[in-house]
Amino acid sequence: MTLDFFQASFAEATPPVGLGAVLLALWYDGKGDWQEAHEIAQAADTPDHCQLHAYLHRKEGDAGNARYWYNRARQPMPAVSLREEWKNLVERHLLKESRR
């Protein structure tokens, strides 16, 4: 799946079939459903989920909570826009899922 296809799927009511949890959360976030994305982020404690959780709190404007989750993910606080971070996360996870 490409980033363009992923973004085009926002026009649909349901996410594309077969998305992993992190991409599913990023899909909901891309559709404007922060709460659903956050529920998914909280469902596991992997480094990927922690980074997703951090991004969501950064987007929410809660820098302290975001820093906590970036530390849990062993990642620095990004120096890029939220849009760029979202895009980077999506592209990384699309690539990761394509290798399964």
Image (spheres, rainbow, N blue to C red):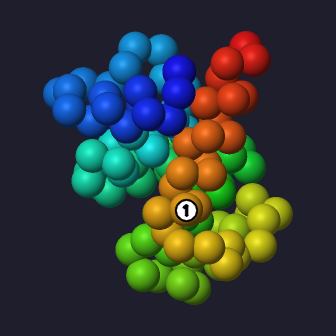
Question: Looking at the image, which residue is at 35% across and 48% down?
Answer: 30
Mark 1: amino acid:
Glu
Taking depth in this image into account, of 43 and 70 the one nearest to the observer is 70
**Would residue 52 appear left or right of 24 to someone viewing this image?**
right
Residue 64 placed where, x, y %? Answer: 57, 85
Question: Looking at the image, which residue is at 66% across and 23% down?
Answer: 97
Circle 1 packing at 10 Å, graded few (<14), some (14-19), many (20+), is few
Question: Looking at the image, which residue is at 55% across and 62% down?
Answer: 84
Taking depth in this image into account, of 32 and 8 the one nearest to the observer is 8
Q: Is residue 62 visible?
A: yes
Q: Please determine whether, in this image, residue 51 is positioned above or below residue 78.
A: above
Taking depth in this image into account, of 17 and 85 the one nearest to the observer is 85
Question: Looking at the image, which residue is at 32% across and 32% down?
Answer: 8
Residue extending farthest to the bottom is: 64
Residue extending farthest to the front is: 4
Q: Quadrant of the C terminus?
A: top right
**Would residue 80 appear left or right of 43 to someone viewing this image?**
right
Q: Is residue 36 visible?
A: no
Q: Please determine whether, in this image, residue 5 is positioned above or below residue 39.
A: above
Residue 3 placed where, x, y %? Answer: 50, 35
**Would residue 77 appear left or right of 10 to someone viewing this image?**
right
Q: Please determine whether, in this image, residue 35 is positioned above or below residue 54.
A: above
Q: Which residue is mark 1?
A: 84
